[in-house]
Structures are given as C-alpha cells and as structure tokens.
Image (cartoon, rainbow, N blue to C red):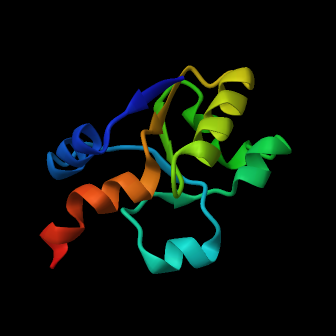
C-alpha cells in the first residue's frame, strides 16, 4: 500500500482523471462532506464482502476516511485479498479540509 497526498489527489481530480475512490467512512460522515467516490464501509472490507469491487483488483483504488487510519487498515486488507494498486489518502478528510476548506468559502 502506498500513500497519496491531498495535493496529488486534488490535482488528479481537477485534471478529470477517472479515479476509483472508496470512501470507507460512516454514512453520517459522508453526509457532512465528501470529495465523491463510492461509499464502501470498512466492515465490508474486513469481512471480505468485496464482490462489488472485485472488478477493480488490477486497477488503482484510492481509499479515504476521516483521518487516514481506517482507510489504511482497509488498504492493507484489500492488498491481502489480491488488489494490486491500493493507495491511502494521507490524513484523510481532516487533511483535505485543513488544506482546501478556505478555497470553498
């Protein structure tokens, strides 16, 4: 598993790249703020209920959560399940908002 910084991810989103983002936060967290992506709970990953994302095994998959801890755990599990190119958003949405919340104002 490798890390991707908020800066690098934002550049790639703004460039219009087709990205496979997995948001492993809880529904109430997603409702507060999101950068997009597919909601996919960490518990699904931990219990190996990954059939909905099996087609992404050979694609780059970027996980994010609130602070980067849950997505890091999820990234490690996905790698163990054979996902070949998993990245974790460093610092999660906390880091993203610290960096970019002023831009939204």
Q: Is 89 on the left-hand or right-hand side of 57? A: left
Q: Residue furthest front?
A: 98
Q: State the image coordinates of residue 9 (x, y, percent, origin top left).
A: 29, 42
Q: Quadrant of the C terminus?
A: bottom left
Between 58 and 95, the one nearer to me in the picture: 95
Up-down relation of residue 56 to residue 38 (above or below): above
Q: State the image coordinates of residue 13 (x, y, percent, origin top left).
A: 24, 49
* Numbered-mark total: 0
Between 53 and 3, the one nearer to me in the picture: 3
Q: Is 87 on the left-hand or right-hand side of 74? A: left
Q: Is 83 on the left-hand or right-hand side of 22? A: right
Residue name at image x 61 percent, y 55 percent? 24
Residue name at image x 68 percent, y 49 percent? 52
Up-down relation of residue 7 to residue 104 (above or below): above
Q: Quadrant of residue 99?
A: bottom left
Residue name at image x 36 percent, y 62 percent? 35
Q: Quadrant of the N terminus?
A: top right
Q: State the image coordinates of residue 96 (x, y, percent, origin top left).
A: 33, 55
Q: State the image coordinates of residue 74 (x, y, percent, origin top left).
A: 66, 40
Between 53 and 75, the one nearer to me in the picture: 75
Residue name at image x 46 percent, y 79 percent? 32
């Amino acid at each position: 598993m490798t890390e991707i910084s908020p800066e690098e991810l934002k550049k790639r989103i703004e460039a219009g790249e087709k990205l496979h983002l997995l948001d492993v936060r809880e529904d109430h967290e997603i409702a507060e703020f999101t950068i997009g992506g597919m909601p996919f709970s960490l518990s699904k990953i931990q219990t190996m209920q990954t059939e909905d994302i099996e087609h992404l095994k050979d694609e780059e998959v970027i996980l994010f959560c609130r602070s980067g801890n849950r997505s890091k755990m999820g990234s490690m599990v996905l790698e163990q399940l054979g996902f070949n190119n998993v990245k974790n958003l460093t610092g999660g949405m906390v880091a993203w908002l610290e960096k970019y919340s002023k831009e939204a104002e």
